[in-house]
Image (cartoon, rainbow, N blue to C red):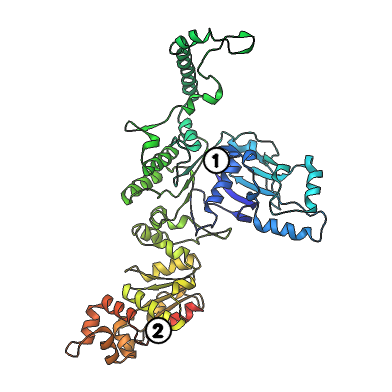
């Protein structure tokens, strides 16, 4: 298992360290947060390959971190020989007997850390020192990768030429099928791992015999005619034969079928599910790492539920890295495994009460992902509170909350304490609004006081004397005449009863009205706090 990941100079990651969970790691972050790049970096260090091709073939200037490149260009203005940008990816591994051949202390940890590990470096090639010196005279943001080389070594400083077989790894990108045949490099690797060496040898031998049979039988008549064609120089005999080279091996010709339909013609959801299921069912006694990108893609709710059940059942001793944009995936697999990525940084979720984790797992439809990704958060009790808070905030500051990165969410009956515990764990600035329900607000605050923090997480409750819920709070600070005008309630009807009965309708009418309306003091205070 991977115990630590260090990335320096690779794409979004200038100087990055992550201590992953031993079993499940759920990677969450906004667009361009670095989820796919992290998976890519792990794959590079484990396989020395990217997208099925060797790293040296795929090396390009855009691998280098932009900030480090820009710093290098600035250094060139006052230094004739600044250090060239480099890339380092290190995987520190669990100290297991079968991984001792990877053990050593040749790594970037300041204190001596002798452990199994793999180091992947992209560094200047000393053979091109002269060319690099010339390039430094007029450098550009495009690093001359032609003058770089890749070093792939163990922590014991032994050169690696292929992935150690003790590190079984599967990568599944369910967002897309990477080849026109529908069977990409990763799927071929997974399928190959399900075959024993003896089986592979037998298949390969039989495949060669079939091709040889086609050469002598199906192509025999054609070759008899070609004997009389003296096209080659020196009148050699020309003939057609089935290719027996490694480029035409059986792996490139065998494709899976689903219910007698070629894999490439199956739906993308089916393809993604098959790739993930096969990867999870791989039989290996060695360290096994599975990386899955966005398992929710192309799947209906029911199919996603089935797939997640398979992942949970087959996880075993494997270490999983799963990136997702789905709150359902996050809730179902467990909030305690969350790794929040943002601008090349990673944050572990602080320890959550197991009961709270189980609570959200039982409510997988609640959008915890919005809570996790919001810059600032306002939690309210129901839809009418949400609608009205947005109206009052807009009146006060001339912008909707979302324009300022503030997400307003209804808790939909979830317990306040559970939501506050999650906000505390992810260190999210939050304003929580609730009704007093006839209780003293100070007593209500005491029940969650240890989860509150002045300036970070604050609770706002309507004054007891103004009424139990939002509707009487509104009536207490606005004239009855103005409310009747906004809501279209005649004098013959009871305003109190109508507003209590038609909570959401009243909120919508107020939100659309161009008439001025005064917010309840606790809502105005919450808006001022979260606006900052």
Disc nearer the start of the sequence (1/2):
1
Secondary structure at badge 1 equals loop
Q: Is residue 335 left or right of residue 239?
A: left
Relative to the observer, which residue lies in front, 240 or 333?
A: 240
Q: Are marks 1 and 2 in contact (CB under 8 Å)?
A: no
Residue 375: image location, x then y, percent: 49, 68
Residue 247: image location, x then y, percent: 55, 26
Residue 353: image location, x then y, percent: 43, 62
Above or below: residue 42 compared with residue 404: above
Residue with the mark numbered 2: 522
Residue at horizontal 58 percent and vertical 13 percent from the top: 231
Other-residue count near label 2 (Cα within 10 Å), few / some / many at <14 / 14–19 / ≥20 = some
Other-residue count near label 1 (Cα within 10 Å), few / some / many at <14 / 14–19 / ≥20 = some
Q: CA distance from mark 1 to mark 2?
A: 55 Å
Residue at horizontal 54 percent and vertical 52 percent from the top: 20
Residue 245: image location, x then y, percent: 56, 21
Of badges 1 and 2, nearer the viewer stands: 1
Residue 498: image quadrant is bottom left
Above or below: residue 184 compared with residue 81: above
Residue at horizontal 54 percent and vertical 40 percent from the top: 51
Relative to the observer, which residue lies in front, 192 or 18?
A: 192
Relative to the observer, which residue lies in front, 373 or 436?
A: 373
Above or below: residue 516 compared with residue 9: below
Q: Is residue 271 left or right of residue 122?
A: left
Secondary structure at badge 2 equals helix
Residue with the mark numbered 1: 51
């Amino acid at each position: 298992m991977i115990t630590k990941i260090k990335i320096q100079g690779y794409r979004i990651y200038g100087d990055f360290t992550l201590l992953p969970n031993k079993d499940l790691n759920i990677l969450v972050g906004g667009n361009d947060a670095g989820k796919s790049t992290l998976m890519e970096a792990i794959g590079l260090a484990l396989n020395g390959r990217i997208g099925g091709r060797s790293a040296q073939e795929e090396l390009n200037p855009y691998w280098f971190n932009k900030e480090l490149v820009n710093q290098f260009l600035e250094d060139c203005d006052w230094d004739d020989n600044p250090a060239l940008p480099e890339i380092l990816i290190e995987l520190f591994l669990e100290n297991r007997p079968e991984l001792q051949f990877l053990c050593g202390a040749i790594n970037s940890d300041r204190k001596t850390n002798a452990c199994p590990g793999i180091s992947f470096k992209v560094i200047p090639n000393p053979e091109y020192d002269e060319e690099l010196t010339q390039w430094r005279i007029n450098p550009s943001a495009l690093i001359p990768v032609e003058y770089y080389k890749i070093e792939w070594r163990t922590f014991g400083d032994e050169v690696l030429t292929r992935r150690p077989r003790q590190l079984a790894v599967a990568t599944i990108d369910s967002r897309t099928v990477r080849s026109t045949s529908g069977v990409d490099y990763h799927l071929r690797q997974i399928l190959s791992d399900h075959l024993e060496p003896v089986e592979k040898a037998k298949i390969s031998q039989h495949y060669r015999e079939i091709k040889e049979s086609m050469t002598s039988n199906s192509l025999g008549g054609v070759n008899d005619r070609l004997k009389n064609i003296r096209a080659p120089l020196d009148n050699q005999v020309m003939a057609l034969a089935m290719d027996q080279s490694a480029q035409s091996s059986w792996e490139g010709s065998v494709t899976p079928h689903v219910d007698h339909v070629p894999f490439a013609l199956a739906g993308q959801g089916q393809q993604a599910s098959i790739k993930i299921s096969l990867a999870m069912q791989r039989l290996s006694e060695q360290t096994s790492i599975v990386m899955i990108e966005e398992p929710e893609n192309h799947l209906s709710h029911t199919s996603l539920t089935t797939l997640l059940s398979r992942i949970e059942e087959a996880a075993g001793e494997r270490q999983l890295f799963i990136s997702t944009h789905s709150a359902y995936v996050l809730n179902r697999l467990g909030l305690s495994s969350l790794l929040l990525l943002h601008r090349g940084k990673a944050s572990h979720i602080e320890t959550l009460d197991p009961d709270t984790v189980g609570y959200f797992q039982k409510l997988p439809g609640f959008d915890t992902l919005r809570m996790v990704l919001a810059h600032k958060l306002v939690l309210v009790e129901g839809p009418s509170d949400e609608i009205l808070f947005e109206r009052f905030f807009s009146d006060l500051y001339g912008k909707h909350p979302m324009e300022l990165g503030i997400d307003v969410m209804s808790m939909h009956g979830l317990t306040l304490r559970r939501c506050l515990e999650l906000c505390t764990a992810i260190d999210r600035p939050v304003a929580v609004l609730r009704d007093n329900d006839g209780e003293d607000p100070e007593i209500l605050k005491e029940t969650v006081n240890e989860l509150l923090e002045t300036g970070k997480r604050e609770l706002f409750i309507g004054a007891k004397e103004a009424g139990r819920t939002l509707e009487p709070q509104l009536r207490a600070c606005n004239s009855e005449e103005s409310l009747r005008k906004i809501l279209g309630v005649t004098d013959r009807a009871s305003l109190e009863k109508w507003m209590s009965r038609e909570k959401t309708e009243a909120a919508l009418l107020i939100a659309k009205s161009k008439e001025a309306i005064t917010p309840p003091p606790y809502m105005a205070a919450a808006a001022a706090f979260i606006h900052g």
